[in-house]
Image (cartoon, coloured by chain):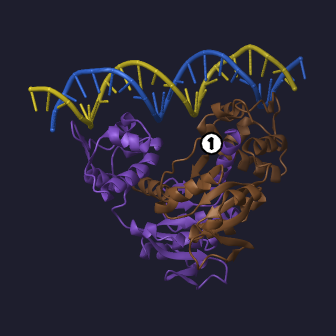
Chain colours: A purple, B brown, C blue, D yellow
Amino acid sequence: MKENSNKVPEAVIRRLPRYYRYLSELFINGIDRISSKELSIRMGITASQIRQDLNNFGGFGQQGYGYNVKELHQAIERIIGLNKQNNMIIIGAGNVGQAIANYTNFEAKGFKLKALFDTNPKLIGLMIRGIEILDIDKLTQEFVKQNSINVAVLCVPKNNAQTVANKAMECNVKALWNFAPVDIKVYDDVVIENVHLSDSLYTLCYKMNSSK
Amino acid sequence: MKENSNKVPEAVIRRLPRYYRYLSELFINGIDRISSKELSIRMGITASQIRQDLNNFGGFGQQGYGYNVKELHQAIERIIGLNKQNNMIIIGAGNVGQAIANYTNFEAKGFKLKALFDTNPKLIGLMIRGIEILDIDKLTQEFVKQNSINVAVLCVPKNNAQTVANKAMECNVKALWNFAPVDIKVYDDVVIENVHLSDSLYTLCYKMNSSK
DNA sequence: TAGATTGTTAATCGATTAACAATC
DNA sequence: TAGATTGTTAATCGATTAACAATC
């Protein structure tokens, strides 16, 4: 899409959702312009960094004025890709899988859940928010194609994670959102994002112990 | 505890849980020694980085031999602080709160859940794994002290997150594990770790769109 | 001992911050 | 216009990688 987008530093990419959050907030509060200085104070980062970050994607500001909140908000929305609909499946309908299925905020941003998959006969057939839990065998290339699935959310125990990831990739899913506490090997054209909860908790634990 | 621990770069701290995971795996598989070279291949990082990282905490290796898996595993366990018991509460017993309450892996690493808190009368009094959901009014300094709570897990909607965080901090909780999609302001002696699920999903979305 | 591999210093790379001319 | 604030280049800072003497 963007010819130079793979040159954008990872650190910048990771800040995009945060910019998006602050701009949403400003927009909701009816603020129509913001300078990098003012935003830097709110976000606790430097104005310089904000300007550098944004200029990876284009010049959205105006000298002497700052940034138009609505415009910048929309621009970042497009940059992230939140203007398009994305269709998801959840693999593993246990605690974590069900919690994500019930979390409707993603739906509001265009991430539509099409199905959950599990191997447990007790779960198969159950409905969550009107979405069915299917047998993992029903996860096929046809299913992915017909439902335009691009994101698979991995909520299985760590020992099954790579197997299930492989299956999803074989069915042409293009993005994996991994909640299993393992590093998954992915195909060249598949992207992955990890939510390593235990890693996060351990980091918190370290900081708690070292801050004394 | 460690006099120089606040000099350890954030990037290194964030890699500690990953080292811990790989060493656990090696240990379980009965491997007793590993060189930085071999580990670097498994983890997909440089041997140099591994040695640099570890040397922030001391010299655990031996020339010509490498690292003793068991020793290094235990050392990292202590560095993170997983050798002590930590007592947690979950504030907000909705989808996310309940999912975390049901996730027993943390318990195995010494993170003991003592109670959940909510304001919803329909939830108050319910038990999850034998742990009660209490009225948020029951969250007091006495409760925190008596149960030696050090970690509060914030699983409330974003509009309540700061209020609830303040309450936890006033009750002397020392660490916040925040699942609300907002940045929380914390007291100087309180540490925080964010699990911004939507940020993570948006990052995945960006990468999916830009990888084409 | 000879080979292997560490701990650590130096070099490189990348990211953040500062500065300022351009310009609204 | 004058003041404000951008976009962008240059300087600084920090993190990663390379190199190698020390030593098991």
Q: Give residue B28's position: percent from left, percent from top.
A: 81, 53
Percent x, y of residue B181: 48, 58
Number of marks: 1
Q: Amino acid at mark 1?
A: Asp
Q: Residue at x 21, y 36 (%)?
A: A64
> What residue is shown with label 1?
B189
- Residue A29: quadrant of the picture: bottom left
A102 left or right, relative to B47: left
Q: Picture coordinates of residue A4 (x, y %)?
A: 35, 43
Q: Residue at x 81, y 49 (%)?
A: B27
Position of A41 with respect to C12 (left or right) is left
Is B154 rendered above or below residue C23? Answer: below
Residue B103 in sight in this render = no
- Quadrant assignment for the C terminus of chain A: top right
Q: Quadrant of residue D24?
A: top right
**Chain of the residue displaying label 1:** B
Tell me the residue at 42%/71% (across/down): A148
Mark 1 neighbour density, 10 Å: few (under 14) some (14–19) many (20 or more):
few
Report helix, strand or loop for mark 1.
loop
- A9 displayed left or right of A32: right
* Extreme residue toward the bottom, this view: A125
Q: Nearer the viewer, residue B78 or A53?
A: B78
Q: Using residue A198 as the reference point, say whether residue A151 is left or right of it.
A: left
